[in-house]
Amino acid sequence: MAKRPADHSTVTLKDVASRVGVTTAAASMALAGHERISEKTRDAVRRAADELGYVPSSAGRALRNQRAGAIAVIVPNTSQHVFGHLYFMHVLTGVSSAANDHDAQLIVSTNPDEAHGVVAYERVMRSRSADGAIVTSAAIDDSNIETLVETGLPVVLIGNFPYLPSAVTVGIDDVAATKAIAEHLIDEHGARSLLHVSGTLDHQTGIDRREGFLEAVRGRGLESFAAVVEGDLSEESGAQAVASSLEDGRRFDGIVFANDDMALGGMRVLRERGIRVPEDVAVVGFDDFGLARVSTPAITTVRTPAERMSRLAAEQLFRLIDGSAEGPTHHELDVDLVFRASCGCESGDGERVTPLRGEEPHRNDRQRSVSS
Amino acid sequence: MAKRPADHSTVTLKDVASRVGVTTAAASMALAGHERISEKTRDAVRRAADELGYVPSSAGRALRNQRAGAIAVIVPNTSQHVFGHLYFMHVLTGVSSAANDHDAQLIVSTNPDEAHGVVAYERVMRSRSADGAIVTSAAIDDSNIETLVETGLPVVLIGNFPYLPSAVTVGIDDVAATKAIAEHLIDEHGARSLLHVSGTLDHQTGIDRREGFLEAVRGRGLESFAAVVEGDLSEESGAQAVASSLEDGRRFDGIVFANDDMALGGMRVLRERGIRVPEDVAVVGFDDFGLARVSTPAITTVRTPAERMSRLAAEQLFRLIDGSAEGPTHHELDVDLVFRASCGCESGDGERVTPLRGEEPHRNDRQRSVSS
DNA sequence: TAGCGGCGCTTTATCGATTAAACAAGTTCC
DNA sequence: GGAACTTGTTTAATCGATAAAGCGCCGCTA
């Protein structure tokens, strides 16, 4: 659109070749270590490339190889606030480390305009800027995801997508995890009247966590004392859910929040009303991306292995891209339960980590600066 | 390296052209809206492109136009823990919104191996995968940055780089901000013995914030009661700095932390020793990326406009790329002071925001889910 | 009616890298 | 001493998009 770019000394294969006195074909083969090129030439070309600081043009290579050498992380913007930011950071960390291992670039694609049906990220795929994509925090009714999966382009979804049987996905068992932590409130802390503040129910996560909660109260015969309020995963919605429940005259001695942000908001309201946590009401959250540990009281929660999940997703993606994996698969990762002060297990800054399944707690998935 | 990718129905310009019955050149011009192509053909081509779902190949275009249509955000990995994650998230938000405005892809490049002098991000630039780069959290002694700037490739740095006069940079006045918030402790809360826990002094930010602190105590004639301990911006280092200061028998009634993470760690130690905040010791932090608001007590801090900074950086970068801006420039953004409970200004969850300069507080740079 | 200008499209060349196929030397073998 | 090989390189084609130059065919004018 504007003038041509300044000519930042760009070294092409031609420069390398002409310095050595061969053609670009020979130079290309030399750099690739082809046997048909004499050792002498190979060395000379390598030396020249080194001296000139030659780096292959990604465009030239991509065009010729029909492969961009990049993967994309796609974030449907409508869910920017749904999963919150800390989650996304963990995702980026995991994906970028896998991308580095595969010498691939990482493209981050947000969808600027939900209004336009012209989904920005489909363009990313169709323009072949990326060889594949990882999609996270997609809503159930986001038909674009379906379209994307159906085009057959390499796509890995993070989360659970029971309605997309042909997708490759990586997730955790939200139902089991929520069930376990709710049962903890009941069995260990004697909670009898439970409230669940769910996430948005247009996301599978919201549905599954609610289902886990319901299974727990049903299993203990407490369903008549249990209630569910829908939130949107934001701190403020957690506060509102608790406030409106209190105003309705509802009584509860335990709250299961679908994430830590809402737990934080809810606890704020409880504090303002003089209701003590955990003495009067025991509270648990979900995610453990950072907030849960630093709040007062610290929140008992489910630690979501976002970084491991996304790393695995990226590795699956690379397998799809090079064709070494086929067909729909779903990987499920184990989670840890982290007991802290908000349920009454620990006091102050103490915490106890227990795997939901398996033996040992999983390595801390890059929590914030726990040690240096 | 592996087999060729499966042939996901890829629509090229040739397909569009042959469907209409013209050459690719004509089709290209038609889509570009060239006048030399008849309206009838233009329409036909556009319709065909639409029907086939044609999206131009980024590689083909990049090769031909000598422009990738992408910008990179570069994160020297050595500083991954230095700035912490939340900061980076804000940066991504800002940059990606600018990138979307310019129809550019966003590449995120972390440096996997500091060991190799082969800086990964220089490859990004030299391979021309990106037309320019934004570099953030670079250490003073990172000579790669200097090299990068000197190559003349379009680069914008976030932060202050007094030793790189030819760089284009965007930052805040760390000295003035820290000075102001330290003076607040002294003037409003009567602090007399001050401690500063600085960031790493191989980052300009660390140096500048320390300098601001020192200017404040010097200005008030309190330099003989002041001390500085170097931290590394991690929560743990803040804890250690406070712990060791206490063990040295040092006494203080105010602490200026170079960021909120360290303040959090420091406050934990104070709490453990039974020292009350703000009654016994008033505390301030820096950044306000999220933690400061939710901790107990909430931390008085300087709100760094990371999102606006990075958005501006990206816009500067686009200007450099298309040649409409030349020469080194430095943009400095204003910051807000946010008074909360840790210094004694407010209680509970209250907060008061004041601009350091100018009239009105700046819009909340995408704080976490304040309202929905 | 011959010649001229312009419209609308095609031809051609290019960007950088890669690879199959062709080819010029030099060896080896019968 | 010529055929068959080997070796090391060059030629040429390709990937997709696009800009410049070229070329029929039209209508218009003298």
Image (cartoon, coloured by chain):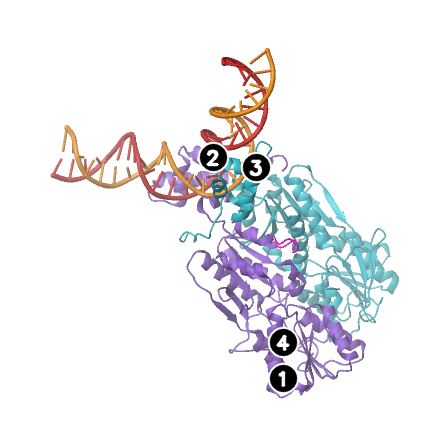
Chain colours: A purple, B cyan, C red, D orange
CA–CA distance between discs 3 and 4?
Answer: 57 Å
CA–CA distance between discs 4 and 2?
Answer: 63 Å
Residue with the mark numbered 3: B40
Mark 4 residue element = helix
Q: Between tags 3 and 4, which lies in front?
A: 3
Q: Chain of mark 3?
A: B
Find residue B53 and report its horizontal and vertical position in percent. 53, 49
Residue with the mark numbered 1: A217
Mark 2 residue element = helix
Tell whether position A113 is magenta.
yes
Residue A183 visible in rendering? no
Mark 4 vs 2, N-terminal side: 2
Same subunit under labels 1 and 4?
yes
Same subunit under labels 1 and 3?
no
Vertical side of A5 occupied by B200: above or below: below
Disc sitting over residue A210 in the figure: 4
Question: Mark 1 packing: few (<14 Cα in 10 Å), some, or many (20+)?
Answer: many
Residue with the mark numbered 2: A15
